[in-house]
Amino acid sequence: MEELQLDKELYINIRNWMVSRYSISTIHERSIYLKKIFKKFKVLNHSNLKKIMRGIKHQHQRATIKMINDYCYDNNIDFFIRIPRVKKQAEKLPEILSAEEIELMIESAPKPYDLAIRCIFNMGAGLRVSEVIKLSWNHIRWIDWLRKKDGMGVAEIKSGKGMKDRVVNIPKKLMQDLYDYAKEQKLLNEYRIPTGGMIFNFGYIANPEKLNKREKEMMRLMANNIQLWKYKYVRTRYNWFRYNIIQKYCEKALGKKIKIHQLRHSRATYLHSIEGLPIEDIQLLLGHKSLNTTILYIKINPKDVFDKLKETKEV
């Protein structure tokens, strides 16, 4: 079959098929572009594909077309269209922040978001902002730490990118400060263990007695579709953190624009260049599937390489 009818029934079927195969963020991202294709074209054929490809700016848009092929294959629909490759632009990597700059960010941020920035940078090889937003008191292994009370802690990062779980370390001082914060918030149970929901609210304080329209929708969503609620919650809290903490305080203190993800790149570089941690260990802490991705995170200073070569023998 050389063309595929793009009708409402097919759109609904593809959307339902996506649910068991992709994360909420991927479904949301691809559904937006899928809807545009179905709205603009009645059929998918080589002629319309050329028009679609001319408007493609991101790889996820090309992936949406490929997804239609995959759906047809899985459902024994006799349709396949060859998708030309999109020229991939060179990825611009974030600037690495110095330890002094990160310290200034922490000092400038109001409490408890100074703690949140410390979690992003210091836990494991650096956390994604979404992981800190979802970080719960119950994700930290408090019992093991309370028995020692003098070492680093451990946290389980649940449903990270690609819906993967991983375990990361929490440095000694940060662990103690998180515990003290839980104590201040009166979140310790009868066994002196912090319990409860997410550690940081990132500006979200819902008053059940005075909910606005958006908050009511979020409450209904939480009751009916917890995964979609988590995705929307993370998205709105990220924006709040970006504008109300990073832009308002940290960028003002540093005197320049920054991206929150720079902290993760900076941590990976710091662990490799300063602490000498092997790239394979950093890959495990970052939760990367490919070592090539981890290598992109680490910015190596040529001077450091030359310094190491000073003692090599000549032939």
Image (cartoon, helix red, strand yellow):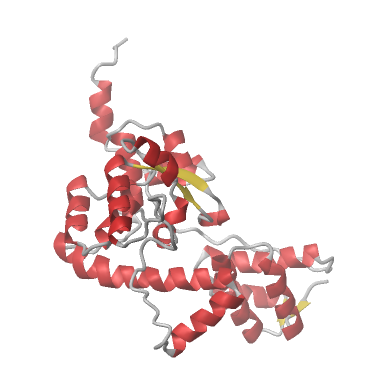
Residue located at (35% from left, 50% from top): 264
Q: State left or right for residue 115 relative to residue 5.
A: left
Q: Residue at x 24, y 50 (%)?
A: 97
Position in image of residue 130 (x %, y %): 43, 61
Which quarter of the rendered picture does the C terminus lie within?
Answer: top left
Q: Residue at x 77, y 76 (%)?
A: 4
Q: Residue at x 74, y 76 (%)?
A: 13
Q: Where residue 36 sits: x, y (%)?
A: 59, 81
Q: Is residue 75 above or below residue 265?
A: below
The image quarter in which residue 289 lies: top right
Q: Position of residue 250 (x, y in %)?
A: 21, 63
Q: Is residue 87 above or below residue 242?
A: above
Residue toward you, 44 or 243: 243
Query: Which residue is most to the top?
Result: 315
Specify the farthest residue to the front: 190
Q: Name the quarter where the N terminus is drawn.
A: bottom right
- Name the one closer to the observer, 79 or 298: 298
Residue 255 drawn above or below residue 194: below
Q: Position of residue 299 (x, y in %)?
A: 32, 42
Q: Nearer the viewer, residue 216 or 21?
A: 216
Q: Is 147 displayed left or right of 36 in the figure?
A: left
Q: Nearer the viewer, residue 157 or 93?
A: 157
Q: How many marks?
A: 0
Residue 293 seen in the figure: no
Drawn side of residue 34 relative to residue 303, left or right: right
